[in-house]
Image (cartoon, rainbow, N blue to C red):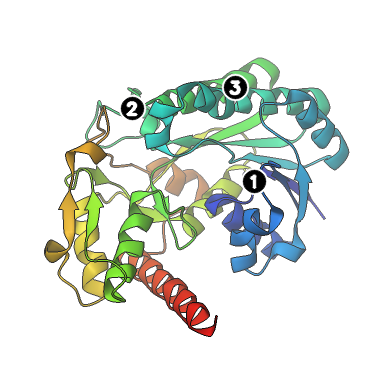
Amino acid sequence: MPTCFITGITGQDGAYLAQLMLQKNYRVVGMMRRSSSSDIVGERLRWLGILDQVELVDGNLIDLASLIRLVETIKPDEVYNLAAQSFVAASWHQPLLTGQVTALGAANLLEAVRIARPEARFYQASSSEMYGLIQQPRQNEQTPFYPRSPYAIAKLYAHWMTVNYRESFGMHASSGILFNHESPLRGIEFVTRRVTDGVARIKLGLARELSLGNLDAKRDWGHARDYVRAMWLMLQQEKPGDYVVATGRTTTIRDLCRIAFGHAGLDYEQYVVSRPELRRPAEVDVLLGDAGKALAALGWQPTIRLEEMIAEMVEADLARHRARQRAQLQT
């Protein structure tokens, strides 16, 4: 039975990746940052019904000693670095923390693997935010980067460190340049969940409006369940490399709202308010990925359409709020 080690296992991508790896008969070990109670931290794994099937261990990306200890003990065949301070908006308020965790944390993990398990295959979660002020209409592996946030800059450091360790030490180290990917497990601070949660609240009479920032920003949105499959495929290749993972379809936040509210039988224009204070200091206006290399080399392509994903998210948020309402009535 092969062993995989996942940092960020309690996040959206980590939970779906753990589920996929269990289906493929891996031993799944996930690193958990001991900063809050485990019953809350493991909620996504519990939602997928796999919390009892994974091994959770304590560690921290900013603590190299803990990473070396874990890699030596676990002896993973595959290492997936999904942990990060991943909320773009927060990176302007916490730029140093974002750099420590998202940038230097990746370097720490690469170094731990190089020292303790150099034969392991390594995956780094890179981000489409690295393209920032886009230099080409469609972004692929050759498109120049122009990051526009402390988060994107930190991700770019981690990305190039992964390339450097591959070229300097011969490690099987790959990066997935993932465009936006969502699901019912997405954190409430991200715009897609803010929208679907807002739809649920308004539909159930718990709110009257939804405040958002730039409604005209365009993103290439896919489903996290599709994207973790691409991560696994990268580490099954004979040679490592970097791959864009995207749907090739771009949608405005305004249209995202229209689809989400429409699923609940509502007109978004009656409820959505754009507020200037919620806009980014430096906006990324458009992202549109070209995943041609992933299709050709990995045989990967998305299977879940945007409308299906949004409907799943709206239904999940409606179910969450209805469950809370029932619980309140019983107390």
* Residue type marked 3: Leu
**Secondary-structure class at tag 1:** loop
Q: Residue at x 65, y 57 (%)?
A: 42
| Residue 90 higher or lower than 227, as above or below | above
Amino acid type at circle 2 is Thr
At 42% from the left and 34% from the top, the residue drawn is 90
Image x and y of residue 142, in percent = 37, 27
Q: Amino acid at mark 1?
A: Gln
Residue 4, percent from left and from top: 73, 47
Residue at numbered disc 2: 143
Q: CA distance from mark 3 to mark 2?
A: 24 Å
Image location (x, y in percent) of residue 184: 45, 63
Question: Which residue is disc 3 drawn over?
Answer: 104
Q: Earlier in the sequence, mark 1 or mark 3?
A: 3
In the image, residue 40 lies at what x, y percent? 63, 57
51 up-or-down from 122: above or below: below
The one of 254 and 135 positioned closer to us in this rendering: 254
Q: Nearer the viewer, mark 1 or mark 3?
A: 3
Q: Are marks 1 and 2 in contact (CB under 8 Å)?
A: no
